[in-house]
Amino acid sequence: MMTSHNNEPQANPFVDGGSGSRSTTKFAAKDVTVHYGENQALFPINLDIPEKQVTALIGPSGCGKSTFLRCLNRMNDIIDGCVVGGQILLDGRNINDPKVDVVQLRAQVGMVFQKPNPFPKSIFDNVSYGPKIHGTVATASDLDDVVENSLRRASLWDEVKDRLQDPGTGLSGGQQQRLCIARAIAVEPEVILMDEPCSSLDPIATAKIEELINELMQNYTIVIVTHSMQQAARVSQRTAFFHLGKVVEIGNTQQIFTNPKDHRTQGYITGRYG
Amino acid sequence: MTDLITMPVRASKAGAARLKQRHAAERRFRFYGLFAICFGLSCIGILFFTIISGGYSTFSQTVVTIDINLERDLIDAKNISDGDFRKIVQNSLYGLFPEVTGRRDKRKLANLVSPAAEYQARDYAVANPHHIGKTISIQVPTSDDMDQFSKGVIRADLPESERRVSDLEIVWFNGLKEQGRIETIFNRTFFKSGDSRDPELAGILGAALGSFYTLLVTFLLSFPIGVASAIYLEEFAPKNRLTQLIEININNLAAVPSIVFGLLGLAVFLNFFGLPRSAPLVGGMVLALMTLPTIIIAGRAALKSVPPSIRQAAIGLGASPMQTLTHHTLPLAMPGMMTGTILGMAQALGETAPLLMIGMVAFIVDIPAGITDPATVMPVQIYLWSDSPERAFIERTSGAIMVLLAFLITMNALAVNLRKKFEQKW
Ligand SMILES: Nc1ncnc2c1ncn2[C@@H]1O[C@H](COP(=O)(O)OP(=O)(O)OP(=O)(O)O)[C@@H](O)[C@H]1O
Ligand SMILES: [Mg+2]
């Protein structure tokens, strides 16, 4: 299995924010396995995720992409009967260690779900919820600023600035998804995990979110699960191909799409199966 | 070619028949539904009609104005309340009908008014000692039989032997009426006194307060315990054999006949812990046991119906399990929990059997002032009155049912309102 310490040139010019050095590893998965009861969903996964880049996880349905993504902020903890093995190092620290405080971990590693899931509260309350529970803002006006900034970065501000007190559930699907992204970035995480964030959106909303991902990449590490090859090619610098609970191939996005090494990867991206 | 044309025609013929059949089935189904609703509504209508037509007269009371002479030789000025006010009232009635002489007739005449008359006269004298020796005019309730006669429940056209009011009494009553002494006023007594042997003095307040205290105890015990159990079982408990067993037993508990809870209360609360008999405290505890499973089951259903995506969203943002619960899950589940609780409380309000076991069926005149005072509750009061021979108690039974129904309707309206208020729009 390949890891990310290869020094291939990156596809995207945004990489490294001009610091000059190569991207460092944010997440390192070492022999990660997942069992749902008797069923093994992931077979030892070794995978590195570089900082301030977009890593795309692709693969046929049921191959364990969501399962792996949930490992990265321990969302599997809340699934009954789910057992995670192996080590996942975040900045060199094993997050599967029982001593790790999951609340802090999830503040550091935010998540956007496949289906938009705003709270049945106002738009403002949706975005301000994270900062409030983590106590990251001191005053009400600071909170207003955080909400405005987050909504701006999620390119939703102009559409909702006049109705911040309206329920978040009253927005359109695409707006709801951007609201969920704003809610996630309001916590100022270092990593954002996105599980098929565009699967229920039209091309325009999808384009907006892809644009957003491009922008967020300057400050955040992003891991995105997608079923759209074009999307993976457009937004990511690195791509990992999952198949039947294993990582078959990982590498530079350009290389995966133009010159896959494994025949299964080739078959999948050319649409022969999956 | 012909095949091509006829085929669709044949198909559409069969299709039309099927369509017709389907429409007919739909119409039939709608009719069944409508019929069921009409049947239910008419049953409720009949119920309400019988209760209201039999009970509305409870809220009025026939009174008679009599002039009583607070004779000095019957009242000791130093100890007014010990005066012979019975005699005073009797004398005033004898004065109205001087032609009555026989002992039996005189006794009948004295019984024309309620025993309340002498208490009223006493209270008046105590309050106005300077009126002693003078003649005053007071309004007192008639006896329950005269009241029933006045309301037309006891009919004059029956033969004398078949009614509780004799011809002579009717003559007296009509005499009083001609003098303008008879009036019908709003029955305040019914709402401000406890039980009594005399129907015209009996009221629902004692039982209503008893019900209130009992339900208060029930609510204070069963709501927090029920909600906490529901939350623990649904949100925190591991799903294993033990919790499965607990779940099955909670469902079993919900189906246990209520009298069994009464027996349990008798054995444990009264005999073992020695808590007072007939007290709302014990009644409330017994009813709390009975209501708990309802609240737990409703609470768990309400928690279950909160979409998991909301929990995921909160946890994904780094909310602790406690924050997820108090900020999101619980507020969303609250309307369902409250509906379950209020339904449970309404059930408890109407419960009789377990309370009989712990002695809340006693004849209690005093109005309870707290949860440890002896008391009865409204359904038990209804049961007691419906068992009494006096015609006037039958009327009061219906009156009490109306009050109970008013309470129930208020509680249900409250439930609907609370739910509307707290319901989240998706
Ligand atoms: N909560 C769960 N309980 C039990 N098994 C699960 C659970 N979630 C996923 N699985 C199993 O784990 C395997 C991987 O599922 P996962 O959801 O990770 O697939 P995926 O790659 O995200 O698929 P998709 O592209 O359809 O979302 C599947 O076989 C699935 O049946
Ligand atoms: Mg998935």
Image (cartoon, coloured by chain):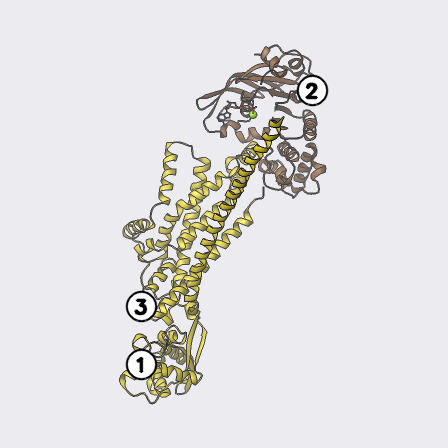
Chain colours: A brown, B yellow
In the picture, residue A205 is in which quadrant?
top right
Give the structural element (helix, strand or loop) at label 3.
loop
- Which of B395 and B131 lies nearest the eye of the viewer? B395
The answer to whether B316 appears left or right of B237 in the picture is: right
Question: Residue B108 bears which disc, if any?
Answer: 1
Q: Which residue is under mark 2?
A: A15
Q: Amino acid at mark 2?
A: Val
Q: Is residue B205 visible?
A: no
Q: Position of residue A35 (x, y in %)?
A: 47, 22
Image x and y of residue A268, in percent: 60, 16
Three-letter residue code for mark 3: Pro
State the quadrant of the C terminus of chain A: top right
Mark 1 closeness class: few <14, some 14–19, many ≥20 residues within 10 Å: some
The answer to whether any part of residue A223 appears in the image is yes
How far, Cα to Cα, is label 1 from label 2?
110 Å
Pointer 3 residue Cβ closer than 8 Å to ligand 1: no
At 40% across and 46% down in the image, what residue appears?
B292
Q: How many callouts does the rendering have?
A: 3
Left or right: B49 in relation to A9: left
Give the distance between the C-alpha atoms of the residues marked 3 and 1, in whole angstroms: 19 Å
- Residue B389: image tag: 3
> Which label lies toward us, 3 or 2?
3
Mark 3 or mark 1: which comes first in sequence? 1
Q: Secondary structure at mark 2?
A: helix
Q: Circle 2: is it few (<14), some (14-19), or many (20+) Cα within 10 Å?
A: many
Nearest the eye: A110 or A138: A110
In the drawing, does residue B242 fall left or right of residue B335? Answer: left
Q: Amino acid at mark 1?
A: Lys
In this view, A256 is above or below A80 = above
